[in-house]
Amino acid sequence: MARCPSCNSYRGSHKDEPIPEIDKKAFETELTGMIDFLKNSPSVIMWVIFNEGQGQFDTERLVQVVKKQDPTRLVNDASGGKWSFSGDILDTHSYPAPSYPKPKVEDQEKAKGKVLVCGEFGGIGMKVPGHMWFEGKGSGYANVDTSEDLLFKYAELYNMIVKMREKNGLAAVVYTELTDIMTEINGLFTYDRIAKVDASKIAKINTFRFKMPNFKEIVPTSEKEAQIWKYKYGPRKGAWNKENFDDSDWKEGPGAFGNAAGKKGNTLWPVADGKIKDNKGRTITEICIRRKFIMPKLSQDEISRLMLRVMHDENFDVFINGILACNAGRANSDYEYFPIKPEALKALRIGKENLITVYCKDTGGGRFIDVGISLRDKME
């Protein structure tokens, strides 16, 4: 796959900002020059003209220019959205969980016959001390601390792909990414090419031969039976995630909270009043929830295999007894398992009462949060 350089980077991506004619001409010259230079390479399987709408212009015409110059390969007109339906591919980007292209109802006819692709997904971050471009810095869309957790999350995402292939016709995916790049620490290798996981196991996952482990519910989500939480709408204030925090003025209600991706929660999570906005002008809607639970007696090995089960829309932070257990961005469309940080596992009180607190922030569309804890079988 060869992706063309965007016309003046993000110019014109999210605003009606005109793209200078000199940039358009330079882009087209480089596009046709790149194809002429690389078209004899057997590793190129398709041409990607635009990425995520960056500097996108004259899409239909440029698709025809590329097809005429190289009629032997597929053309991806717009990786990550803003499809013109003039190419061969419909390509969406989704983090961390994969997704598949979902054309609007009015575009269904134009979408017929197109190859469905998830051109970017994953982004599981893992720091490897001594093998980082900026030591100690960087993150992914979801973050783990161990090779085993990275392997599980990678396998879990590919398990979703199997279902999308069978149910929705997803034909191809591209994982982000093979190697770390400076502060992007979501590679399967570090920036200096040290493997983070066993390559033979990655190969098994990529060819759908990896057996997913089973799970035992320890602290249930509200999927089967509604679980009662204390909750409050709005931003985090004070020691809201600490055990000695006075939550007497918080409401009490059944999870899950909100509605998203076809899932309907048991407690309404209304959109905020619009007073708090992010740097893109989107209204921020926030919720904080608290719940106590008794942790059953488990061995140290079992404790090391505890994971959070979460459905979220969008960004969330989970704390156990006031210690950060997990955080992730964006949204998922179904429940996923997330590793619990070692510090939070150490904070668990076995056989005694514990506190789990959750913060979730939404910036538009659906809103949803539900959290539980499960015990994972040993990995093969």
Image: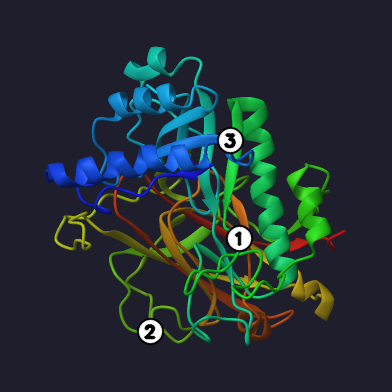
* Disc 1 crowd, CA 10 A, few/some/many (<14, 14-19, 20+): some
Asked which secondary structure carries label 1, the reply is strand
**Which x, y percent locates residue 281?**
17, 56
Which sits earlier in the primary sequence, circle 1 or circle 3?
Answer: 3
Q: CA distance from mark 2 to mark 1?
A: 22 Å
Residue identifier under label 1: 372
Question: Label 2 belongs to which residue?
Answer: 239
- Check disc 3 and report its element: helix, strand or loop: loop
Q: Is residue 242 left or right of residue 282?
A: right
Coordinates of residue 134 in the picture (x, y in percent): 49, 83
Residue 163 appears anywhere in the view: yes
Measuring 63% from the left and 45% from the top, which residue is drawn there? 224
Establish if 368 lies above or below 190. Answer: above
- The amino acid marked with disc number 2 is Ala
| Residue annotated with mark 3 | 45
- Name the side, left or right, on which 214 lies relative to 69: right
In the image, what residue type sits under mark 1? Answer: Gly
SS category of the residue bearing label 2 = loop
Asked if 72 appears above or below 182 in the picture, the reply is above
| Quarter location, residue 326 | bottom right
